Amino acid sequence: MGNRKITEAGGCTALILNDGITRSPGFIFTNLIEVSQFILWVHEQFESFKRVAEATTNHGKLIDVRTTVEGNHVYLNFDYYTGDAAGQNMATIATAAILQYITGNTPIKPRHAFVEANLSGDKKASALSYLSVRGKKVTAEVLLKKTLVERYLHTTPETMAEYWRLAALGGVMSGTMGVQAHYANGLTALYLATGQDVACVSESSVGVTRMELTDDGGLYASVTLPNIVVGTVGGGTKLPSQAVGLKLLGLDGEDKVHAFAEVCAACCLAGELSIMGAMCAGDFASAHQSLARGRKTT
């Protein structure tokens, strides 16, 4: 029903805000003096890191490196642009090459070095989502006239906006990463059908939904998702059924990944409208009763 409403409204608008995939190697030193000397050396090595990383791939680009210190631990967050691939394997291989370069060339030798130290946010909902990007950061919006809300959702824009405020505060008080109803439902189905890494739904389903009244009494709805981890080439997109799924969408192959990320956001927007509309109309429980328990099995 959410998809139908958006279609009746003339479609939604989507925008890519940022693009990048991260990997965060970690280093253990003896003391802070070694840490500070290592960081000074690292800050002079970006061009060398870039050369080493990009020698491992025809498509990936190292775009940034950020440093985090905790005691005698150092974390380096490497940000990559990975073209039309989701890029997680690409980033891992490139970072492994950088790690080899570091351990072979740094004058301050770490006691231990690891290719991932759990600061990248890989396959986890984290506060990093709103500070940087992992995958594609996407936002989508739609304007619905009052008549569309009443016809398809059996409620009013005023009730939808009131419910959104109630649910948003509920999300804040429960400590969720972002405020949204059920991004994971739509993304899981879409990821399975198109050969994406389904485990990445844990981070991709972080985001913010917003609904408010427009000046003419209609409904404005938007979603913003900072971690849409998808690709249109490589990985599971080569599987027979999943390749067909992408082709049916017209999103298979090169130069399609940003459009695919926008489709993911639009899918979540439709799902938010549907589930929140069901809450407002009082249909949420009855729909589950009739469509699930109401079915007889043999």
Image (cartoon, helix red, strand yellow):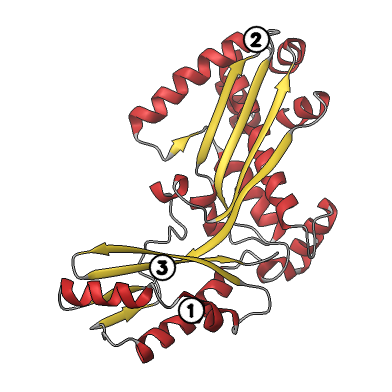
Q: Answer above or below: position of 77 versus 105.
A: above
Q: Residue at 65% of width from left, 56% of height from top?
A: 192
Q: Answer above or below: position of 64 versus 179.
A: below
Q: Is residue 205 left or right of residue 149?
A: left
Relative to the observer, which residue lies in front, 126 or 81? 81
Disc number lying in front (1 or 3):
1
Q: Residue 257, position in %: x, y?
A: 72, 57
In the picture of the structure, the residue carrying the numbered disc 3 is: 24
User: What residue type is disc 2 on?
Assistant: Thr
In the picture of the structure, the residue carrying the numbered disc 1 is: 49
Q: Answer above or below: position of 181 versus 219.
A: below
Q: Answer above or below: position of 158 versus 238.
A: above
Q: Residue at 33% of width from left, 86% of height from top?
A: 106
In the picture of the structure, the residue carrying the numbered disc 2 is: 156
Q: Residue 161, position in %: x, y?
A: 56, 15
Residue 123 in view here? yes
Quarter the C terminus occupies: top right
